[in-house]
Image (cartoon, grey):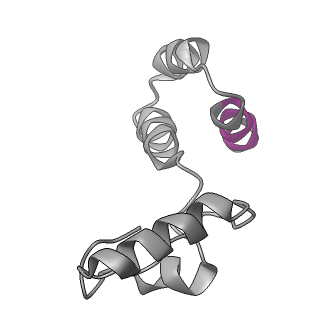
Amino acid sequence: MTLRDNIERPEALDLGSNVLAGTDPLKIIDSVRMMIDKKPDWENPFGDGTSGIRIIIYLCSSLFVTPLIYKVVSILRSAKEKEVVNEMGKYY
């Protein structure tokens, strides 16, 4: 929920993952109620959160630093990052 009259990320409004509540206290209260009751069923329009690991894998493979790739892979914790590593591993 954005407590301003404008927003830099209108795609979040389009998806319904954000609401522009403005600064009017009554509208803020209505917006809070609406967002609390809303089921989060949208996809993130800004990516999957794994660009950092993709960049590391690319740079390591470009520099032929294979042991570093294995180290990076071994410290990853989230399933999503592991999926990306498995995907990227096809190419290196």
Q: Is residue 68 shown above or below 38?
A: above
Residue 69 lies, in percent from the top left, at 53, 23
- In the rendered structure, the answer to whether residue 26 lies left or right of residue 61 reads left
Q: Position of residue 33 (x, y in %)?
A: 55, 66
> Residue 59 or 19: which is nearer the viewer?
19
Residue sitting at x 34%, y 71%: 2
Q: Residue at x 73, y 61 (%)?
A: 39
Quarter holding the N terminus is bottom left
Task: Locate residue 23, reporting x and y percent.
Answer: 23, 79
Residue situated in front as seen by the camera: 2 or 32: 32
Secondary structure mostly seen in magenta is: helix
**Residue 61 location, x and y as percent?**
50, 35
All told, the count of numbered labels is: 0
Residues drawn in magenta: 82-88
Query: Magenta segment: does it hold 86?
Result: yes
Please give the name of the residue rendered at 75% of the width and 34% of the height, measured from the top-left corner.
Answer: 86
- The image shows residue 37, relative to residue 2, as above or below, that is above
User: Foreground: 87 or 17?
Assistant: 17
Q: Is residue 87 above or below residue 82?
A: below
